[in-house]
Image (cartoon, coloured by chain):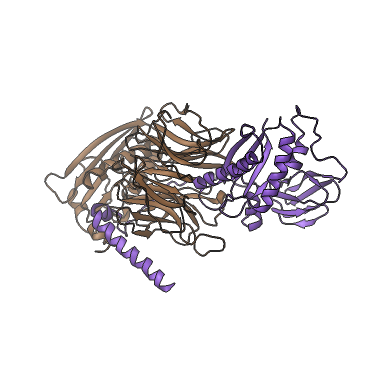
Chain colours: A brown, B purple
Amino acid sequence: MEINKGAADKIRVAAADFKPLSADPQASSEKRVFDTTLFSDLSSAGIFDMVSKSMQPTATPGSQQEISIAQWASAPTSASMVAFGNLNVSAGKLVVNGFLDDAKNAQYPLIFTKMYTDEATDDAARQVAHRFADEIIFRLSGGVPGIAESKIYYVRLMGDGVKEIAEMDFDGANQHILTHLGTDAISPRVSPDNSRIAFSALSRDGFQIKMYSLLLNRPVAFPTAGGSNISPAWGPGGSQLAFSSSRLGRNDIWVSDPQGAMARRLTSFGFDSSPTWNPKTGSQIGFISGRTGLPQLYTMDSDGSGVTRMTDGGYASSPSWSPNGQFIAFAWDRKYGPGAPGGQDIYVMEVATKRWIQLTNGIGRCDFPTWSPDGRHIAFANSPDGRANHTRIMGMLADGTDRKALTGAGADMPNWSWK
Amino acid sequence: MANERKTEFMNGQRMRTAIVAGAAALLMLTAAGCKKKVNDLPPANTEAPSSVPAPTASISADPLAIDLGQSVVLNWRTTNATSVSIDGIGQVNVNGTTTVSPANSTNFHLVAKGDGGTTEANVRVTVRIPEAPTGPTGNDDGNMGSEAEFKANVKDLFFDYDSYELRPDAQSSVSSAARYLNAHPAVKVLVAGYCDDRGSAEYNITLGENRANSAKTALVNAGVSPNRVRVVSYGKERQFCTEESESCWQQNRRDQFSLDR
C-alpha cells in the first residue's frame, strides 16, 4: 500500500468566482476575500483536486439557472463538482448564495444551495467562505466536518518576557491577542465546546492554572494551589481537566473538574507534566515523565493505572493525542545532550504498536504539535535557529507534507480547537 | 549506526503502512500531492523598522555587590547599534556577557553607537573591602537584614545540565546561606528555580521546581524553618541570559534567592 495516491483519486472540484449582484464598490473587496478564501479552504482540505482558475469557463454563473453545467464538465475544466453562486452587498449587509453542483449529473446537478448573511466586512466575508467550504467538505468527504471554521489558540511573545494568549483562524488569518495579563501566559488549551481556554500563568505564587472565557471575553476565576500548576488538558467531555501540579512537593498529574474542584492525584512519582487525553475514548491520558531520567512519553488509564512507557530514550515533550484515538504526536530529540547530533522534531506514534514516524527534519527546533479536528493536519511551533523569540507556528498535513508557516516569528505553543 | 538508521527507516515504512491500513479514510485525505494553500498570512511581527531608529541599550550585573576578589557577570543588550564599548573593557559585541572582577566599586558605562545616534547605559557594582562587616551581627533578630547583606551571604546555586542535585559548590553556598538565615530568624527567603532554554517549556517548570526544592530541603536540613522558605519555579521563562552558549546556559541553570517580604 502506498501513501502517495495520485491526484486522480481525488474529487476534481471547480470553485467559480462568485457573481457580484450589486455595483457597491465595497462589494469588490469582499468578493475578492470570499473567492480567495473559498479556493484556499477547498485546496487545503487535502481531499480535492482543484481546477486552476485559468482552466475554468469564462462565464460567471450566479445561480442554478445561469450555469451551463456541460461546459464545466467537459475538458479542459473536467470538473466533477462545481461550487458557484452570487454575492451581494446592500445596506451594510453581506448576502451570499452558494451552490454546489454535480457536473456529471446533467439532469439534476444541484447537490445543495445555502444562503449566508452577515455584516459587510472582509472578516465576515472570510468567515462566510469558511462556512460554505466546510459545508462542501462535509458533503463530499463522507460526513467528516471541514476545519475551515476551526481556530488555533497560541502564545504570542510580546517582548520583555511577557507572553499573552492569542487566537487565529486555522489558516493563520485573523490573528489577535485575547489576554492582557502582562505576565508569562503559556500552554493554552481550548475546551471541547470552544467556551473556555485553560492556560498557565506566572504570578507571585509561581505558575497557576488560569481560565479565560471565550463567551465573556475575560478571565474567570480558577482556584490557586500550592506549587507549580501547569499544562492543563481538557477531557473530551469538557467535564474534567488534567494538569501537572506540585502542590504536594513534586509535579504529579492531577485531575479536577473545570472549576478546579474535586482535585485528585493520578501519579505519584514526581517529574510528570503535559497530559493529553485520548479524545476518542476519554479513558486514557498520555503524559511526559522524567521519573527515570530524561523526560519520556507515557500513557496511563484515566484513573492512573496501567502506566506504560512509550519512548525508548532521548528527550520527549508536548504530546497531543489524535482525534481518532489512534496516534500521539509529540516532540522528540532522540539524541539529546550537549553536542549531540540531530534536533527536536515532530513525531507521530501509533499508540497500539509504539511504532513511529518522523514528520519534520532539519528545519530547526520543533515543539507543541496539535491536531486539526479532522485529524488531517498538524500545527506545531518551529524555531529555525533554535532561538525562543524566533519561534513561529507552522501547519502541515498529518503525514508531514505540505508544510507552511501560519505566523511570523513571535508565536508559540499552538492548540487547535476541537471543532 | 548504519543498522540503526536502517531500522528507523523500516519502522517508518511499516508505520506508514499501518497508518494507511488503520485509517484508510484519514490517509486518503492526507495523501501527498494535495496542495494546501494558505492566504492572508499577516506576519506576526508587524513592526517595520523606521528609517534610522536610535539605538537602545541596557546593561545589568549579577550580583550587584561582591566581596573583593569575587567576580560579577555583566550582561548587556543593545539594538540598532553598530559599535558598542564599555569603559574599562573596550569594544564589545552588540549583545553579550562577560565576567569581571573589579578591585573597587565600579560604574560600568556602556556606550552604544548606531546610525540613529548614541545611547548610554550604566550599572554600578559595589565591591566590599575585606574589613567591611559582611557576616551576621547577631543582634538584629527583629531586623529583616539589608538587601546587600542578604545577597552577600545567600548566593545563587548553579546546577548541572538537566539535574537538580546540589553540586559541591552549591553545598557550600547553602551552608553559608543557612548560617546567615539561622542568625537572622526574621528573614524569609524566596527560592526561584530556573532552567536553561533548551528542552520543553512545560517539563522545565517541573525541573525548576525540583531545583528550588533541592535548595529548600538543604536549608531545612541545616536548621532553617520550612515556613521561612518559599519556592517558585520559572522553568525556562524569564531567562537571565539569552545567548546560545554553555556559559550562558550555566547562568540560567540556577536557584536564585531573594528576600521574601
The residue most toward the right is B131
The residue most toward the bottom is B2
Q: Is residue B107 above or below residue B35?
A: above
Residue A171 located left or right of residue A85 = right
Q: Position of residue A123 (x, y in %)?
A: 41, 36
- Give residue A10's quadrant in the image: bottom left
Q: Is residue A113 above or below residue B16?
A: above
* Viewer-nearest residue: A409 or A34: A409
Would residue B201 be visible to someone looking at this image? yes
Residue at position x 66%, y 37% in the image: B223
Residue at position x 30%, y 63% in the image: B14
Q: Is residue B69 above or below residue B145?
A: below
Quarter of the N terminus of chain B within the rendering: bottom left
Q: How many marks?
A: 0
Would residue A67 be visible to someone looking at this image? no
Residue A33 located left or right of residue A84 = right
Q: Position of residue A93 (x, y in %)?
A: 36, 29
Quarter of the C terminus of chain B within the rendering: top right
* Viewer-nearest residue: B181 or A86: B181
* Viewer-nearest residue: A369 or B154: B154
Q: Position of residue B90 (x, y in %)?
A: 80, 56
Q: Position of residue B194 (x, y in %)?
A: 60, 45
